[in-house]
Image: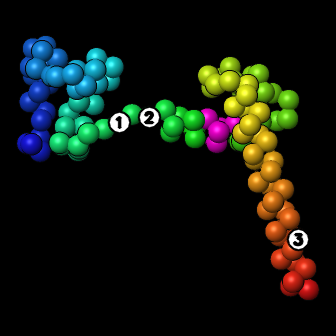
Amino acid sequence: MANNLDWMRDLDEPEKYLDKDMKLVFENCGIDTVISLLEGLPSINVYISSASVTKAQKAYIEKHFDGNNQKKLALEIGCSERLVFQTTKEAQKKRHEEVRKKSQADLFNE
């Protein structure tokens, strides 16, 4: 594929020439994203998973949880209260395990 596809911007109704997924990309993200994908990832199948969003939500929850704002966080980032609860519980368990390991290591260093 050509390295520079800027000429696509000059087409009248470029979406007429795009197929299936690229047409969806155009409709949702615009011609700049279409060109970027075609130039940067030519002939590559791209699957867009929500797993990355869930990971980011968990990181946001861990950073902003104050002990009493489950509902606010869930509404703010568009997730369930259950995800907030699970994430804070996992983070608490991880911190507890890190403290336990550090305490054990300190015993051996004395």
The dot on residue 47 is 1
**Which is nearer the N-term, disc 1 or disc 3?**
1
Q: Secondary structure at mark 2?
A: loop
Which amino acid lies under the numbered mark 3 shown in the image of this protein?
Answer: Ser
Residue labelled with disc 2: 49
Lower position in the chain sequence, tag 2 or tag 3? 2
Q: Residue at x 69, y 31 (%)?
A: 83
Judge the density around disc 1: few (<14), some (14-19), many (≥20) Cα neighbours within 10 Å: few
Q: Position of residue 64 (x, y in %)?
A: 73, 36
- Side (left or right) of 80 relative to 34: right
Dot 3 surroundings within 10 Å: few (below 14), some, or many (20 or more)?
Answer: few
Residue beneath the point at 80% across and 51% down: 93
The residue at which mark 3 appears reads as 103
Marks 2 and 3, how far apart at CA: 39 Å
- Is any atom of residue 44 visible in this view? yes
**Residue 64 visible, this orientation:** no
Q: CA distance from mark 1 to mark 2?
A: 6 Å
87 to 105, vertically: above or below: above
Callout 1–callout 3 Cβ contact below 8 Å: no
Q: Give the quarter of the image for residue 56.
A: top right
- Disc nearest the viewer among 1 and 3: 1
Label 1 SS: loop
In magenta, the rendered stretch is 57-61
Mark 2 vs 3: CB contact within 8 A: no
Whether 15 is among the magenta residues is no
